[in-house]
Amino acid sequence: MKVYYFLAALIVFLFIHGFLMAKVEPVATYFFVFVWWSYIFLIDGFLFWRTGTSLLVRLKVRFLLLVLGSACFWIFFEILNLRITNWHYSGPSLSPTLLIIFGLLAFGSVLPGILETHEFLQFLGLGRRLKFLGWERSNRFLAWEWWGRPRYLWMAIGLGMIVLALLWPRYFFWMIWGAVIFFVDPQVEKEGGNSIFAEVRKGKIRTFYRLLLTGLICGALWEGWNYWAGLKWHYTVPLAGEWKIFEMPVLGYFGFSFFAVECYVLWQWIRCQGKRTACRLQKAG
C-alpha cells in the first residue's frame, strides 16, 4: 500500500511536466503550484514507502495548519517586499477569489517543501558523519556559550536586521533572509524545542548543514519551475550583478540556504506552541 502512494505521486509529477510541455491549461499558467505540490507529495510518498513514516502521515489533519502557517509566514516577506521591492509578479490578472486560492496554495507550499526536502536529505544520511569537519566537536567557536544567550540580545539582533533592511533596503535587503533565525530560535530553546543555537553549543552542526543544502536544492527547484510558469516572479536585486540562473541572480541563491534555516526554526516554534496548547487543553479537561 505504501508504494502505491509513492507511485501515484510520481505519475502525477510526471504528468504535470507533460502538461506543461503540451501547454495544457491551467497547468501551463499555474505550473509552479501544480509541480511544487506534486513534488511535496512525491517526497512524502517516497519517505512513507521507505521508512514507514512521513511529515504528512505524522501530522494528518494538522498538516493543514502547517500550510496555513506557511502562507502567513510568506505573507510576512511579501509585506517586507513592499519596501525592499526585490521581486514582482507577472502573468494574467486574477480575481480576488482566485488570488486568495492561488496565494494560499503557493505560499502554503513553502514550509512543507522545505521540511520534506530536509527529511529526504536526513533519510540519505547527509551530515551523519562530517568527517571533513574534524573540528566539529572541539572547535571553540562552535562551543561558544553565547550562541543564543542571552535570549533577548539575539532577538534584538534579529529585530535590528529587519529594521536595517527596511531603512536602507539597497544595502541591507539580504538581512531579512536570516533575521528570523536570531529572533525565533532563542524562543524555541526557551520552550524546549529543537534549537539550532543549542545544537551549535554542543558542537553539532549536522542539522544546520543539511538545512543550508536544503535551501540550495529548494531554491534551484523553485527558480527552475518558476521560469517555465505563465504566472511567475521576477527579481530586481541591487548589487547582485547581472549573472542569473533562471530569474535569480547567482548571489541570490545564498539567501535560500538561510531561508531554509528560518523555515525550520519557525516550524520548531509552531510545534512548541502546539505542545503548549495541547498541555493546556489536557489540564483544562
Image (cartoon, rainbow, N blue to C red):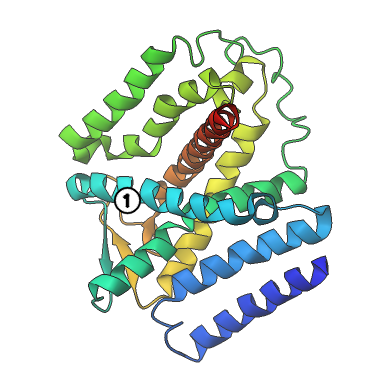
What is the quadrant of residue 210 in the picture?
A: top right
Quadrant placement of the C terminus: top right
For disc 1, the marked residue is 75
Amino acid bearing label 1: Ile
Q: Residue at x 19, y 49 (%)?
A: 82
Image coordinates for residue 268, horizontal then vertical, percent:
55, 34
Task: Give whichever of 142, 115 is nearer the camera.
Answer: 115
Q: Residue at x 73, y 30 (%)?
A: 132
Image coordinates for residue 94, horizontal then vertical, percent:
26, 75
* Count of residue discs: 1
The residue carrying pointer 1 sits among few (fewer than 14), some (14 to 19) or many (20 or more) residues within 10 Å by Cα, namely: some
Quadrant placement of the N terminus: bottom right
Task: Give whichever of 8, 85 is nearer the camera.
Answer: 8
Q: Secondary structure at mark 1?
A: helix
Q: Is residue 277 left or right of residue 207?
A: left
What is the quadrant of residue 133 in the picture?
A: top right
Image coordinates for residue 191, horizontal then vertical, percent:
53, 22
Q: Residue at x 67, y 32 (%)?
A: 206
Task: Give whichever of 199, 194 is nearer the camera.
Answer: 194
Q: Is residue 236 left or right of residue 24?
A: left
Q: Is 73 placed above or below 57 here?
A: above
Q: Residue at x 45, y 57 (%)?
A: 108
Q: Is 243 placed above or below 131 here?
A: below
Residue 167 visible in the shown view: yes
Image coordinates for residue 239, horizontal then vertical, percent:
26, 44
